[in-house]
Image (cartoon, rainbow, N blue to C red):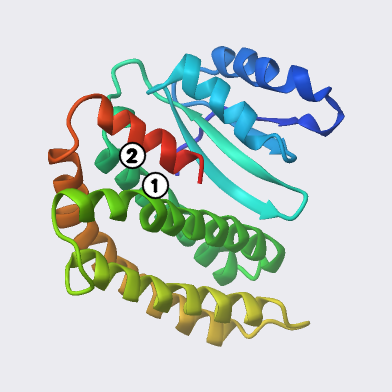
Amino acid sequence: MSEVTRSTINLSNIEPERRPALVLEQFKLLPEGGELVLILGRERLQVLERLQSEQAGKYEWSILEEGPEGSSVLLTRHAASDRRAVSPAACMEWDHDRLDSLLAAHGEALASGKMDEAAQRFREFSAGLRHHIRMEEEVLFPAFERRVHSGECGPTGVMRHEHRIIESLLDRMAAVLGWPIPGVAELESLRGDLIELLSEHNAKEEHIVYPLTDLHHPGPERQDLICRMQAV
């Protein structure tokens, strides 16, 4: 991954009513392609709603970690000429690329014996991929099924089945990483299985489900889909 400007804001000590405005202020200071990590509590949706209202189409909203008391989110600023945020297809393809980079970083750390870093990269990858799956299954797939093809035998039925296999692989990798001495060989094997599955899975989504969803949701409907996916 190329070097980018990244900063972090921990909102836990900021008054709740000030948090959305502070995030908006810091976002406006980001250079194009810059990243802002937000450590959030239960006010995540309030912050997102403010961004959606005032900065729609100018950012990506990516989950890094989630827990019962809060989460951390990566906010990425688009270049002024970048139109991907007005297209659900391009938005989801961008997230595929981001997740691929995180999985690659996990593999590099694993190969170098940097187990703490490997575990951190995996946590970010797993949280992001699980959020990506929720965005699809709760928002994008139902939109596709309403306009294009419904039923368990359609493309989204296949995607949902593969999602369950992907989640099982993530669970198994997390279990291995959780041992006092993680089994590197087993992790590499599971990681290889996951990469192979994701390569085929993502290609089917990018060539069938995503473009057809865009095609059948013109104009403002596309931004509405993106906003609803971000809020999952």
Task: Tell me which residue sits at (20%, 68%) in the image.
Answer: 151
Q: Are marks 2 and 1 in contact (CB under 8 Å)?
A: yes
One can see residue 50 in this view:
yes
Label at residue 117: none
Q: Position of residue 100 (x, y in %)?
A: 40, 56
Place residue 1 in its image quadrant: top left
Q: Is residue 66 left or right of residue 100?
A: right
Is residue 6 visible to us here?
Answer: no
**Residue for point 26% across, 34% down:** 87
Residue depicted at x 73% and y 22%: 19
Residue farthest right in this picture: 13
How dense is the environment of label 2, judged by Cα within 10 Å: few (below 14), some, or many (20 and up)?
Answer: some
* Amino acid at pointer 2: Cys
The percent coordinates of residue 224 (x first, y second) are 35, 31
**Quarter of the figure with residue 9:** top right
Query: Circle 2 is placed at which residue position?
Result: 91
- Amino acid carrying label 1: it is Asp
Marks 2 and 1, Cα distance to the nearest angstrom?
6 Å
Q: How many circles with numbers are drawn on the protein?
A: 2
Q: Which mark is residue 95?
A: 1
> Mark 1, residues whose alpha carbon is within 10 Å: few (<14), some, or many (≥20)?
some
Position above or below: 49 against 117: above
Relative to residue 194, is residue 1 depicted above or below? above
**Is 128 drawn above or below residue 33 in the view shown?**
below
Residue 142 placement, left or right of 124: left
- In the image, taking residue 96 as reference, residue 151 lies left or right, namely left
Mark 2 falls on what kind of element? helix
